[in-house]
């Protein structure tokens, strides 16, 4: 059955994506990761219960739209990453083929390590074709 095969392939790819998010969540300081569309709709997430997934995804969508508008108006090219640092946390948003990878981390987490890990995860996610 062609539909069963397509569901199997899709679920296998989703499991791969879930593993990538899970690996990213093992990086010290990260509390959760999501894949969101430009519209802020959650595609996939692995986030702690302390964090409101829907709120994070909606706010990430708003940040993405604003940053894209700024980049476009200034003629600065395609949006690749957004980093937001507050006194309580850091947000990392990385463009991927199907939307954006979002990571929420501690304010005192290692910025360089998080950027490298997020970029590596984005490459892995981009290698999975849906």
Image (spheres, rainbow, N blue to C red):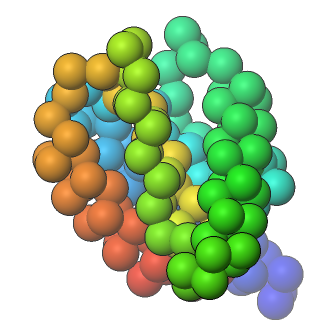
Quadrant where the N terminus is found in the figure: bottom right
Taking depth in this image into account, of 118 and 45 the one nearest to the observer is 118
Horizontal placement of 34 versus 23: left or right? right
The residue most toward the bottom is: 2
**x%, y% of residue 84?**
45, 38
Q: Is 83 rendered above or below residue 51?
A: below
Taking depth in this image into account, of 56 and 129 the one nearest to the observer is 56
Q: Is residue 58 visible?
A: yes
Q: Residue at x 67, y 64 (%)?
A: 70
**x%, y% of residue 95?**
52, 67
**x%, y% of residue 89?**
39, 21
**x%, y% of residue 115?**
26, 53
Quadrant where the C terminus is found in the figure: bottom right
The residue most toward the front is: 74
Q: Is 103 rendered above or below residue 73?
A: above
Taking depth in this image into account, of 70 and 118 the one nearest to the observer is 70
Q: Residue at x 63, y 75 (%)?
A: 74
Horizontal placement of 25 versus 36: left or right? left
Q: Residue at x 31, y 64 (%)?
A: 119
Q: Residue at x 27, y 66 (%)?
A: 120
How many numbered marks appear? 0
Q: Is 21 rendered above or below residue 126?
A: above
Q: Is residue 37 visible?
A: no
């Amino acid at each position: 059955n062609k539909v069963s095969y397509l569901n199997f392939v899709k679920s296998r790819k989703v499991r791969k994506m879930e593993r990538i998010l899970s690996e990213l969540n093992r990086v010290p300081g990260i509390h959760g990761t999501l894949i969101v569309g430009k519209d802020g709709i959650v595609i996939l997430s692995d986030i702690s219960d302390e964090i409101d997934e829907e709120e994070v995804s909606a706010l990430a969508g708003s940040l993405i739209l604003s940053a894209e508008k700024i980049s476009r108006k200034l003629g600065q090219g395609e949006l690749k990453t957004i980093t937001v640092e507050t006194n309580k946390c850091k947000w990392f948003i990385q463009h991927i083929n199907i939307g954006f990878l979002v990571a929420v981390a501690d304010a005192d987490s290692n910025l360089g390590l998080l950027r490298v890990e997020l970029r590596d995860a984005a490459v892995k996610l981009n290698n999975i074709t849906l």
